[in-house]
């Protein structure tokens, strides 16, 4: 069978590959010429995206490749600083408050001075903040430092979403967002692996230097590769069109869904690493490898998955629903046993939910935003993630402290199941209202 490749039937159906080779179970061997078609179809998922989107993706990758501190932050605060779980929870709450206010300010600044300046300043100043954070030792000092750092860093979030809309054709917006997410996850998949190795072989302090330097490099790359004169965005309009986000009832239902779901999702970056260490006795490098699994699956499969879902015309609201389903399953499986493979299955389920739900919910929020208010809409959308940091980490830490890990996973499963029902409600409301993608303001 030399020259043939072993693939599953799902791949064959998705890319319409023809093969007459004998099958074994659900797998078959396909010849090299059909593999060329598979490769071509994979590459086609990236076609049609503007050069500006690719440059923004490159900058985002450089930024996220150095983001090694945050996945290990809870371990750092417990192991290096000696804080209790409730103290760590409150520090993460300060993180969330800073994120909440930072995304709000970032959205308003995006509508007034433009996304280019917001992105560049956020990356540069955020890099300096990461370097400075390591020199703080007291509980209150670290809490305030986290607040200030994330206030600056998360102004980036609404600006990058608006940039995606500005540089994309309407039919390419979801894939542009998926490419930005691919860059984030490619950097994030590399970061924790390197971070775990650095912690094991050098120290936690090195992570702060590397994270800060890469943020500064990302700002420098953006300044060099995407000069202001090359930016195609129009000057911010003084006239606002459409409903303000707080008066858009369907948009606010989407925000509620995102707040509740991301409160559960962020457990994978605070409580789950502690669960890996305390319940399964895993070292930092193994924890980094599990986080790497999340990133590498997204890098390889998200763009083809998004492309396939668009080809079968799945609605953005139903994609959001299925994302919730897989997220809920990722927590409940953790109570099925102590086998290490359960952790892998949980990570894979969470990743599938993230790949399905996140790009489409991002695109849905951007689609709902009228011209002249996109920064405000995407700022509020990004603030939903900030709220999750305010309450999610703290709530998760205190739930574990009071009820243990197993009961916490049951509670989270129940919450995400409710969120899935809210996603179906959103789908029905949108369908009932017969809202078109070109409608500027989604009235109920």
Image: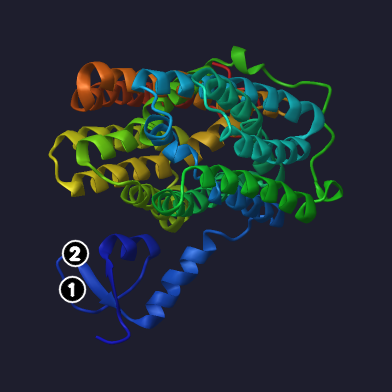
Dots 1 and 2: beta carbons under 8 Å?
A: yes
Q: Please name whichever residue, 23 or 374, is drawn nearer the observer in this view of the structure.
A: 374
The answer to whether residue 436 of the structure is visible from this angle is no
Q: Which picture quadrant has residue 432? A: top left
Q: Please name whichever residue, 345 or 435, is drawn nearer the observer in this view of the structure.
A: 345
Which residue occupies the extreme top position in the image? Answer: 247
Residue located 26% across and 45% down the image:
282
Which residue occupies the extreme bottom position in the image? Answer: 2
Which type of secondary structure does the marked residue at label 2 adopt?
A: loop
Circle 2 sits on which residue?
Answer: 26
Horizontal relation, residue 163 to residue 317: left or right: right
Residue located 58% across and 23% down the image:
147
Residue located 60% across and 47% down the image:
63
Residue located 52% across and 42% down the image:
205
Which type of secondary structure does the marked residue at label 1 adopt?
A: strand
Figure colour scheme: rainbow
Numbered badge on residue 237: none
In the rendered image, which quarter contains the N terminus? bottom left
Horizontal relation, residue 44 to residue 119: left or right: left
Measured as percent of width and height from the top left, residue 224 is found at 79, 54
Q: Please name whichever residue, 288 or 223, is drawn nearer the observer in this view of the structure.
A: 288
Circle 1 sits on which residue?
Answer: 23
Within 10 Å of disc 2 (Cα), the crowding (few <14, some 14-19, many 20+) is few
Measured as percent of width and height from the top left, residue 177 is found at 57, 44
The answer to whether residue 322 of the structure is visible from this angle is yes
């Amino acid at each position: 069978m030399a020259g043939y490749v072993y693939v599953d039937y799902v791949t064959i159906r998705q890319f319409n590959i023809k093969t007459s080779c004998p099958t074994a179970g659900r797998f078959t061997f396909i010849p090299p010429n059909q593999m060329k078609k598979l490769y071509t179809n994979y590459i086609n998922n990236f076609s049609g995206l503007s050069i500006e989107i690719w440059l923004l993706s490159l900058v985002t990758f450089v930024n996220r490749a150095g983001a090694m501190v945050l996945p290990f932050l809870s371990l750092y605060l417990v192991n290096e600083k000696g804080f209790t779980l409730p103290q760590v929870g409150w520090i993460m709450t300060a993180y969330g408050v800073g994120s909440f206010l930072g995304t709000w300010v970032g959205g308003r600044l995006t509508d007034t001075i433009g996304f280019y300046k917001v992105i560049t300043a956020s990356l540069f100043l955020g890099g300096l903040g990461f370097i400075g954070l390591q020199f703080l030792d007291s509980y209150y000092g670290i809490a305030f430092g986290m607040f200030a750092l994330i206030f600056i860093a998360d102004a980036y979030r609404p600006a990058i979403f608006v940039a995606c809309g500005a540089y994309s054709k309407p039919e390419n917006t979801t894939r542009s967002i998926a490419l930005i997410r691919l860059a984030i996850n490619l950097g994030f998949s590399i970061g924790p692996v390197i971070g775990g190795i650095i912690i094991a072989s050098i120290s936690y302090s090195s992570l702060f230097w590397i994270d800060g330097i890469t943020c500064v490099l990302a700002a420098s790359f953006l300044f060099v590769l995407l000069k202001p004169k090359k930016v195609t965005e129009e000057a911010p309009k003084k006239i606002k069109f459409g409903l303000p986000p707080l008066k858009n009832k369907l948009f606010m239902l989407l925000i509620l869904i995102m707040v509740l779901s991301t409160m559960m999702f962020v457990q994978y970056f605070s409580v789950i690493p502690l669960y890996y260490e305390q319940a399964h006795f895993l070292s930092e490098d193994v924890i980094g490898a599990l986080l790497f699994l999340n990133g590498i699956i997204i890098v390889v499969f998200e763009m083809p998955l998004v492309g396939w879902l668009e080809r079968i015309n799945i609605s953005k609201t139903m994609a959001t629903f299925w994302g919730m389903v897989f997220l809920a399953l990722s927590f409940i499986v953790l109570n099925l046993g102590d086998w290490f493979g359960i952790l892998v299955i949980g990570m894979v389920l969470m990743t599938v939910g993230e790949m399905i739900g996140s790009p489409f919910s991002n695109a849905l929020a951007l689609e709902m935003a009228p011209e002249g208010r996109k920064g405000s809409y995407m700022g509020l959308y990004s603030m939903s993630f900030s709220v999750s940091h305010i309450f999610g980490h703290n709530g998760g830490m205190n739930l574990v402290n009071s009820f243990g890990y197993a009961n916490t996973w049951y509670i989270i499963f129940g919450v995400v199941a409710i969120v899935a029902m809210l996603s179906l409600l959103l789908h029905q409301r949108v369908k009932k209202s017969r809202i078109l993608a070109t409608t500027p303001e989604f009235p109920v």
